[in-house]
Image: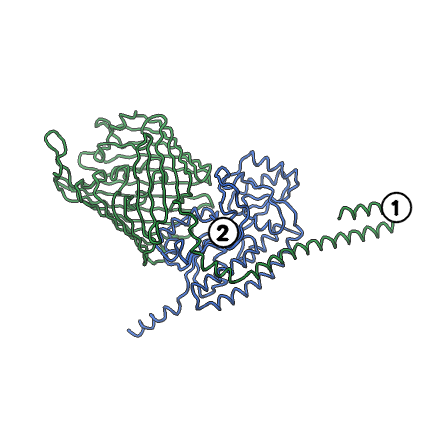
Chain colours: A blue, B green
Amino acid sequence: MKRILLILLCAVPMFASVHVTAAYPYIGELVKTIGGNKTQVSVLGTSSSDPHFVVPRPSFIGVLRQSDLLILNGGGLEIGWIPPLLSQANNPKIIQGSSGYFDLSKYVKTIDKPASLSRAQGDVHADGNPHYALDPYNIPILAKVIMLKLSEIDPAEKAFYRANYDAFAARWKEKLTQWEQQMAPCRNNEAVQYHELFSYFLNRYGIRTADTIEPLPGISPSSRHTMELISLMRDRRIGLIVQDTYHEPKTAQFIADKTGAKVVSLPYDVGTGAKDLESLFDIMSSQICRH
Amino acid sequence: MAKLLWLSIACATVLSANESELELLKQQMSALHEQMMQMQQKIAVLENTAKMQVTNTSQDETLTSMVQNDQKTAQTTMLPDIAVILNGGYTSRSVLKDAYAAATIPGFVNDMEVPFNAKNGFNFNYAEVAMSSTVDPFLDASAIFHIDGSGGIEVEEAYFTTRALDYGFKAKAGKFKSAFGRVNEKHHHAWNFEDQELINYVLFGPEGLGGEGGQIQWVAPTPFYLMAGFELFDGNPEQGFSAKESATTGVGYLKMSQTLGKATVLAGLSYAQGKSEVQNLDLSGEPIANSYTDYGQTRIYGADLTVEYPLGAFSSLIWQNEWMQRDQDAEAQTQKQAGFYSELLYRMDGNWASGIRYDDLYRNVAGAPDDLNRFSAKLEYKPFEFSRFRLQYNHDRSKAFNDERKTVHEVLLNYTLELGAHGAHAF
């Protein structure tokens, strides 16, 4: 009996892995790719909810309590739901300021940083647009810093993380060329989005966002703004409306009916509609630039 | 460039009379056009690929040192987060202010305190100023000041919590609200309705259970949420406990939550115990200093259950219930009183929400009514995350006026505005 117990006790560290909690599915995907079976990944947000307003379920507290590393999108995206969870999880490893609190937004360049800050402009983010993960060129950077972070927390597996990263980066490079070719014919087009969610993707491939369906970030569509949008789209012959999966689709459809524009409903994260990161960008590029 | 080419085609057309030559030229031109488009695309691809090369060769060392020195840049400002919350509105009640303040809830409350929406007409209820910050690597602190319409300032809460205790522990001390039950800890602006749930009001008063004290909470290392907490407070007669100096109230609770399919279930059990000592009065009815009669103990049992079911990204159903019983040792026997509430809340979308609530005090002291209840309904409009307008109706059968029970009808229209620091609310 004693011997069995001893074996069990010795076996525990053998299976020990880094507990990582990812704020959003795409982060979870990256950690699984780099960390493989050396990490145990929990994901909080889902692809079907608004990333700004994930319901702070108490079950997340249990998950955070046992995490070695919390990886956030950052840029203010989680400010409405992570702080109370974090303060209730009583885990000093992952509180802000400790090495297990990892904010990815610090490693990428954000766009649309507001010159002045007032809530009269709606729900503006002081650090710029936080949906930077939808630029496929940012993904290898995120993968790399995650690789470096995992190596810092778990130095014994450094080579393993590096090898996984190298393989991923090489594969991603090929995909980038493929998406370039897919998106090239649509360069210099204009589009309308519901929320400035896909700006990084559109900007990357030279598609300008003429306006958004919501009058200001976080404000529901108004009839006045919708009418202005319709005349703008007619004047400028804008034929594309990019709609996300969690906002109401009625306004976009109404505008499309009036202007003849095409509504493209896109997933913004891995989950329903996109089984992994590659297919997420495959879907975005093939839907936005059909030819 | 393309325009120039097409222009030359046009010129060529005029100059040439030969039909077949024209066809040939057209073909050549369109081939040229095609080639140009392809070249443009290639340039774009090359531009982006060049950017990719730059990011790929950007020094690993720089990134590595950034990753490792992350913690040093975390604190961007030394100022505490400051939030101001404003609440007020318009009230229409079937009873005037003075009569309402003189009402009783038989068996439970003899001196009504009406902290919000006291009079018919416009009411400015409060401005709440909340400040919070990390103090040092080991402590966080918050102070919340409540300023009412007449300018009275009160420290609603002021406490510090630990940041770095191991094994899932956290300690808190100062003046704060107890985490007993489901709603006791929440501030007015986070309530589901404009007024307090009846059972909370009659047992703990408008401020709720809490005060000067200490707390320890422990989160279990389980895949679901399991939290146990223990608190000690100075006894407070408004909350049904001894008024004697150095009398303490002990509070303990257990909270559990699990996600079942799409639904989230949160359940809790709570218990509070303290001495029920009553200050003695002299013949003229004035309290005598340091003279108390010890009747024994006051025990409060609580159970709560919340089920949240998401219907969409901005739509959900919430069913929230709480039950409490108080066993209070009195002169001859132990008095048992109990009540509960049940609420059904429906969030239609990001802007609109509605809800209904039923309050019932079904167990009371001998000789007092045991059918005190209240029905409430509300409609909410949130133009933005930080502003809310709420219309509420109450059909209140819990009040008595000069020992005579009378139904009170209330219509409340209130605004709540949150200014400043982004206040994330807990579940």
Give the percent coordinates (x, y) of residue A218. Answer: 49, 41
> Nearest the camera: B362 or B331?
B331
Disc 2: which chain? Answer: A
Between disc 1 and disc 2, the foreground one is 1
Q: Residue at x 33, y 34 (%)?
A: B147
Depicted A74 relative to depicted B148: above or below: below
Reading the image, the residue beneath label 2 is A47
User: In screen coordinates, is B378 left or right of B228?
Assistant: right
In the image, B310 versus B22, the foreground residue is B22
Q: Say which residue label 1 marks.
A: B15
Residue B160: assigned label: none
**As rendered, which of B268 and B6 lies closer to the eye?**
B6
Q: Please, what is the three-letter code of the amino acid marked with disc 1?
A: Leu
Tell me if I can see residue A178 in this picture. no
**Residue placed furthest toward the bottom:** A3
Is residue B269 among the parts visible in the rendering?
A: yes
Quarter of the image holding residue B156? top left
Decide if residue B288 is on the left or right side of residue A123: left
